[in-house]
Image (cartoon, rainbow, N blue to C red):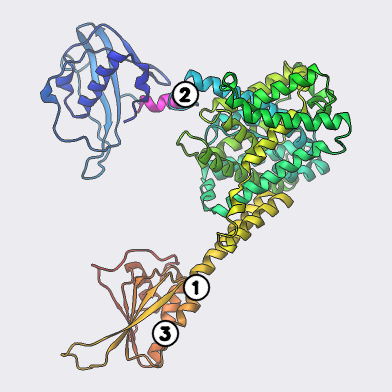
Amino acid sequence: WDFTWIKMVSGKSRKRLFLFLFVSAHGKLQNAVTGFSSSTIQIGTSVTSSVLLDFHSKTRADIYQKERLNHAAMRCSTSFTYSSPTSIQNLSLLRMTSIPRGGANENEIEKRPNTESESTTTPISQIESITQNAKFINPFGRSPPDRDTVISSLAAGLAVSLAMVPEAVSFAFVAGVNPLVGLWTTVFLGFTAALFGGRAGICSSASGACSVVVAALCATHGPSYLSTCAIVSGLLQIVGGGVLGLGKFIRLVPHPVMLGFVNGLTVVMLRAQMSHFKGLSLKSAAGSAMYGLTGLTMLLVRILPKIGVFKNVPPSLGAVTIVSIIAKMFKLPVKTLADISGAETFRGGFSVLPTIGFPNVPFSIDTVKIVLPYAITMAAVGAIESLLTMQLLDGMADDKKRGSTKRECLGQGLGNLVSGFAGGIGGCALLGQSIINVQSGGGKSRLSGVSMALFLAIGIVAAAPLLASVPIASLVGVMFVVCQSTFSWSSLRILNKIPKLDAAIIFLVSFITVKDDLAKAVVAGVIASALGFAWKQSTSISASESLIKQSVFSKDKTPWKAYKLNGPLFFGSTLQFSTLFDIQNDPNDIILDFTNTRVMDHSALEAINSVSDKYGEAGKTVHLRHLSGDCASLLERLNGGNKPYELIELDPRSDPAYGVATESYGK
C-alpha cells in the first residue's frame, strides 16, 4: 500500500481512514461503516474531479482476522457522494486488485451497491488510483517537498546557476556561436531535463563533449544547422532511450570504465579552468588578484559549512558572494563574467530573449544527410555522459533512490528538442555542476534543477549587471574544489592491488576522454573489459579425472573414466576444452559430467560434438551427463538424431535448467 497521500488528512480523520481501508481490504466493509459524520475530508485530487469522503466508522473487535495480511500489490479506489449527516447516497468499492499467497489472480472488480437504492449506483470510475494521479500532477515526487527541502533546493539552484555561466559561455565559443546561445541553451535544456529527467539533482547545460562534436557543423553550415542537429539529437534520445529503453545498457559499463570516465572528465574540467590563468603572472596585480581570490574561494567553500551562521547556506554560493563583495569593495583588477562573454551578453532586458521556432534550414534529403551523422554522435555522447552522471549521483545522494535510465534519456531528449526550437546548441548533464548541486543540498528535489534554469533566466533578463560583475576567480575556485572531490583518488592507491587489465582500462578511458570524446572512451573501455573477461573465462575451464568400477554383474569389468568439468564452455574456451582428454589411452566408455559447467553457445555444442566424434572414430562411447534439457535437445537436433557413440543420459531430478545462446535448428 502507498499511503503517502493520506498525509493531507488530519490526524483524527487519518486514523478513521486507515481503519476503513484496512477493513475494506478484508471484505468486511458492511461491518466497518455504520454511520457518517457531517464533516467532509478531501483526501486527494484526480485529473478531472475531487474525491470526497464523509464517514464516521465504528468497528467491533471481531472484524480483525487472526491471519496476517498477504504481501500483496493492491490498488483501491473509492467513490462517495455526500447526501446527509446520517446516511449516504452511494457507496461503491470500485476496484481492488490483490495477489494471494497461492499466486497472482486476474484483476477482480467487486461492486457493492447501496442497499437503499440499486438505481442510484454511480458507474465505475475510470480513475484507477488516487496516488497515481497525485504523482502525475506533482512532478517533484510522491509528496510536495517540505519547507527545508524547498529552501535548500532554491539555494542550491542559485549557486549552480552562477557556476553554469562560464561553462555555458566557453562551450558556446567552442561550438562557434554567440555566448547568449549557450546561456539560453542552459535555461531551456536545464529546466526541461530537470523536470522530466531520471532523478533529482542532475543539472544539464550546453556541454563541452557535445560542443566539440558539432563545432565542425556550425563552421561549415552555420548556427541554424546546429539547432537542427539539437532537435534531431533530442528525437533520437527520446525514441532510442525513452521509448525503446536502450539506456538500460549503461549497466554493462564496468567499474574501471566508470573510474576512467570520472578521472578523464575531471582532467577536462581542470584544463578548462586553467585557461583563465593564461598570461597572468604572480608579479602582476591582475595575476595576484586572480590567484588570491581563487585560493580564498577554495578556502571558503571548505570552512563555511563549519560556521554556524552559514550552515544552511550552500558553501559555493556563500563563497562566490563573499569573494564578489571583496572584489567590488577593494576594486581588484580581476576578470568578470562580462569580460569573458562581452558586454552585449549581459545588456539585459527583453531584447535578449530568444526567438522560438523551427530553424531556418531547407526541408530536404540533403539537410538530413548533413545533420544526421552529427546528431547521432551528439545523441550518443550526451546520453552516455548523462547516464554515467546519474549513476555517480545515485551513489552520492543520500535519498536512497536510483535514477531511471529511461526517464533520463527522455528528459535529455525533450531538453535538446526544446533548446533546438529556441535556437540552442543542445547539451547534456554536467558532472561538475551536478556535484555542486548535490553537495549544496539540491539532490533531494527536482526543484533545484528547475530553479537553476529559472534563476539563470532571471539573471540574463533582469539582473544582468549584477551577474556580469561576478569575478571569474570565484567560479574557478568553486570548480577547483569540484575537481578535487570528483577525481577518484582511490583509483591511484589501488593500482598495484587490482588486476593489471583493470588498471589499463582506467588509464585508457581517461586518456581517450581527455584526448577525444566520452563516447569513444566508454565504447573502447567496454570492449576492452569484455575481451579481458572473455580471455579470463576461456582459460578457467578444467576437468578432474576419476575411474568408476563396474558392477560385478556387468559383462565388461573394464572401469569407466569420468571427466568432471569445471568452468564455462563457450566460444573462447573450446580450444582449451579439446585439450583436456586423452582419447587414445582412455577406456572404451567415457563419462563427461557437466554438473559444474554451463554450455553457453553454439561453439560449445560443436566442441562437444567434435570430442565425441574423435572418441567415436577410436571405437569408444561417450556418456554425456547433467546437461540441461535445452542443451540436450539442441545437440540432438544438431546431429539429426542420437549418435551411437554419443549417449545423452538425462536425469530430470538432478539435471540443471538453463538455456543456450544459439539459433534454433530445423526451422
Q: Are marks 1 and 2 in contact (CB under 8 Å)?
A: no
Name the disc covering residue 657, or none: none
Q: Is most of the magenta stretch helix, strand or loop? A: helix
Q: What amino acid type should be assigned to the residue bearing mark 3?
A: Phe
Q: Judge by depth and name the residue closer to the eye, 94 or 509.
A: 509
Q: Which residue is mark 3?
A: 581
Residue 458: x %, y % from top left: 68, 19
Determine the secondary structure under disc 3. loop
Question: Which is more foreground, mark 2 or mark 3?
Answer: 3
Asked whether 130 falls inside the magenta stretch, the response is yes
Q: Which quadrant of the structure image shows residue 435?
A: top right
Comes first in the chain, label 1 or label 2: 2
Q: Of 382 and 322, which appears nearest the observer? A: 322
| Label 2 secondary element | helix
CA separation in Å, label 3 and label 1: 16 Å
Kind of residue sitting beneath label 2: Ile
Q: Is residue 645 found left or right of 389 in the rendered image? A: left
Judge depth for marks 1 and 2 and give the one in front.
1
- Name above or below for residue 182 compared with residue 370: above
Q: Is residue 538 visible?
A: yes
Q: Is residue 606 left or right of residue 191?
A: left
Mark 2 touching mark 3, by CB under 8 A? no
- Residue 539: assigned label: 1
Residue 513 percent across, percent down from the top left: 69, 50
Q: Specify the farthest residue to the left.
A: 62
Q: Position of residue 481 (x, y in %)?
A: 66, 36
User: Which residue does the numbered mark 2 point to in the structure image?
Assistant: 137
* Above or below for 591 versus 335: below
Crowdedness of circle 3 by 10 Å Cα count: few (<14), some, many (20+)?
Answer: some
Q: Which residues are magenta?
A: 129-135
